[in-house]
Image: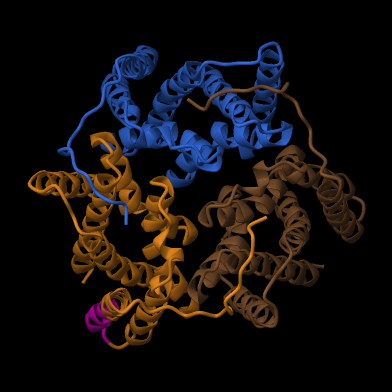
Chain colours: A blue, B orange, C brown
C-alpha cells in the first residue's frame, strides 16, 4: 500500500510539473522559467502540507521527486516543440488531474498522522490548491483558485469522500476521492458552474 | 487566562475572515473565492507564526477555527446581500481590528515560547501582516502593507507596548497593545500619515 | 569556520536588504514600505530553507539579523537621498551578490544537516531565489526568477560547484561556489543570455 501511495504521489508531482510547463509556454518564458514554474507548482502544495502537519518535507529526503519534475518538464517541452499552439483547455485539464491526485494524497497523509477529519479534508484542499496558486501568482495570472468553477470546492468534496471511505477501504477510498474531485472539476469547467452569493453590484475600485 | 487568549484568537480569526470576504465582494468573486480568500486571510499569519516558532500550527489541531471562519464568512455574505455597496473604509477598519488582535496574539505566543523580546515584536508584526498580505496578493490588489499609512509600523509599536507591559500584567498588556495598534492605524488612515524617506524622484521603470 | 559562516550569512542578509530598499525606492514607497520589502527579501529565503530542513529559523533565535537589516536599509536610504536616480543595473547587481551569498549558505546548511547532494543544490537555489521572489511579488514586479538571464540556473551551477568541492576544502568551496554564481549571473545580465526552449509562438491569452 505504501508503495502504491509513493507512485501515486510521483504521478501527482509529474502532472503538476506538466501544468507549470504549459503555463510557462503560454507566457513565452524561457527554459529557466520553465524549471522554476514546473517545480513550484509540483512541490508547492506538498511542502506546505508537510510543514503544517510537522512531517519531514517529502522531496528533501528523496531526490527522486526532483528527477520526476525534470523528466516531466523535459517531455512536455519536447511535445510542445511539435506544435505552435495549445488550447487553454489542455492546461485546465492537466491542472484538474493534479488537483485530484493531491487532494487525496494530502488528506491521506493528514489522516495517517492522526489529525481530526475536518482538518484532513482542509489539508487535502491546501495540498491541491497551493502549488497551482503559487504558479499563477508567480506567472501573474489570475489564480484559478479564485476564478470560481468550483476549484477549491471540488477538493473539499473529493477530500470528504476520501476521508469518509478511508477507514473501510484504503484503495477504493483513494480512487473514489480522486475521481469525484476530477469529474466534479471537469464538469464545472465544461458547464461553467459557479455559485453567485452576492447580488450584482457595481463599485469603482478605489 | 488561557481561555481568554483562546477566545481572543478566535475573534481575530473571525475579523480577518470578514475582511477577506469584503475584498472578495469588491472583486466580484463567487462563493468559492470567498471561502478561499476568507480562510487565507484568517489563518495565513498565524500559520507562518507557528511554523517559524516551531509550534504546532494552531488550526491543524483544533477544527473549531475552521467553523469560526465559515460562520464569519457566511454572516458577512448575508449582510452584504442586503446592500449593493460597501465603503472602502469598511474593509480598512475590519483589517485594522484584525491587525490589533493578531499583533498581540503573535507577540504573546512568541513570548510564552521564550523568544527574545525583539523577535516577539517582529513575530507579532508578521502574524498581523501576513494574512492580509496573502489576501491582497491573491486578489491582485496592491498589498496594504506596502501602501503606507503606518501599516506594519503600527504593529511594531503595538507589539512593543505589549512586550514591555506583559511581564507585569498579562491582561492589561494585551488590551493596551491591541488598543495602541488599532488607534494608531485608524489615525493613520484618517489623516493619511506617511513617512517620506526619499526625495521626490522620477524614474522610468526600465 | 562557524564564525566565518556566521558573518557570511549576515553579509548576504545585508545585501538582500539593500536590494529590497532599492526596489522600494524605484516604486516610490515610503519608509514603512522600505522596512517591509527589505526584511522580506533579506529573510524570506533563509526562513523557507530552515523550515524545509526542519532547523530552527535563523533570525528567530538571534535578533542581530534584525539589526543588520535595519542598518542596511537605513544606510541605503541615506545614500539614495543624495541622488535622484539609480540605474536599473544597480538593483540587478545587488541582487546578484545576494544570490551568490545565499546559494552557498543554503547549500552549506543542508549539507551540514546531512541531506542528499541533489537536495543541497536545490536548497541553495531555493534559499537564494525565494527572498527576491517574495520581493518582486509584493512589489508587483515581474519576478526576476522568471525573466530568464540564467537566474535560478546560476544558483544550480554555483551550488553544484560548492557541493562538489565542500568535502575537500570548506573555505575554497564557499568562495568558488559564490564566485561562479556571481560571475555567471553578471555575464548573463551583460550579454542577455537566455535559453529558448520553445519555438516562437503566438497565442491569445484566453
Any magenta on residue C117? no
Question: Residue A49: where, in percent of width, then height?
Answer: 45, 40
Q: Quadrant of residue A3?
A: top right
Q: Is residue B138 above or below residue A177?
A: below
Q: Work out whether residue B147 or residue B39 is closer to the camera in this orientation and state it.
A: B147
Tell me the quadrant of the picture where the C terminus of chain A can be found.
bottom left
Residue B94: image location, x then y, percent: 23, 62
Instruction: Judge whether residue A112 can be spotted in this image.
Output: no
Q: Is residue B152 left or right of residue C67?
A: left
- Looking at the picture, how far across and down is residue B146, in whole percent? 46, 65
Q: How many marks?
A: 0
Dividing the picture into quadrants, the one containing residue A18 is top right
Q: Residue B32: horizontal and vertical position, in percent?
A: 27, 34
| Span highlighted in magenta in the image | B169-179
Q: Considering depth in this image, is C184 or A68 the residue closer to the camera?
A: C184
Q: Nearer the viewer, residue B85 or B18?
A: B85
Residue B174 is one of the magenta-drawn residues: yes
> What residue appears at the point 21 percent right and 55 percent down from the top-left corner?
B14
Q: Main secondary structure of the magenta part?
A: helix
Does residue B138 appear to the left or right of C19 in the view shown? left
Against A33, is B143 above or below?
below
Where residue A60 sits, quadrant-wise, is top right
Which residue of the protein is positioned furthest toward the left in this rendering? B82
Q: Is residue C35 above or below residue C143?
A: below
Residue drawn at point x = 32 percent, y = 36 percent: A122
Q: Is residue C89 left or right of residue C47?
A: right
* Residue B184 visible within the image: yes
For the point 63% across and 26% down, the residue is: A25
Amino acid at each position: 500500500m505504501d508503495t502504491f501511495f509513493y507512485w501515486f504521489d510521483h504521478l501527482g508531482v509529474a502532472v503538476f510539473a506538466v501544468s507549470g510547463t504549459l503555463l510557462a509556454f503560454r507566457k513565452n518564458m524561457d527554459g529557466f522559467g520553465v524549471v522554476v514554474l514546473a517545480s513550484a507548482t509540483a512541490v508547492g502544495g506538498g511542502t506546505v502540507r508537510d510543514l503544517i502537519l510537522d512531517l519531514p518535507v517529502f522531496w528533501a529526503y528523496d531526490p527522486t521527486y526532483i528527477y520526476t519534475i525534470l523528466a516531466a518538464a523535459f517531455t512536455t517541452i519536447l511535445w510542445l516543440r511539435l506544435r505552435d499552439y495549445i488550447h487553454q483547455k489542455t492546461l485546465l485539464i492537466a491542472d484538474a488531474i493534479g488537483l485530484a491526485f493531491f487532494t487525496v494524497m494530502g488528506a491521506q497523509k493528514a489522516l495517517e498522522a492522526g489529525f481530526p477529519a475536518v482538518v484532513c479534508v482542509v489539508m487535502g484542499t491546501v495540498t491541491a490548491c497551493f502549488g497551482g496558486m503559487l504558479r499563477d501568482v508567480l506567472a501573474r495570472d489570475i489564480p484559478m483558485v479564485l476564478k470560481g468553477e468550483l476549484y477549491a470546492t471540488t477538493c473539499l468534496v473529493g477530500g470528504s469522500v476520501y476521508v469518509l471511505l478511508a477507514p473501510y477501504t484504503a484503495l477504493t477510498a483513494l480512487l473514489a476521492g480522486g475521481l469525484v474531485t476530477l469529474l466534479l472539476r471537469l464538469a464545472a469547467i465544461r458547464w461553467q458552474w459557479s455559485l453567485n452569493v452576492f447580488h450584482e453590484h457595481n463599485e469603482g475600485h478605489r
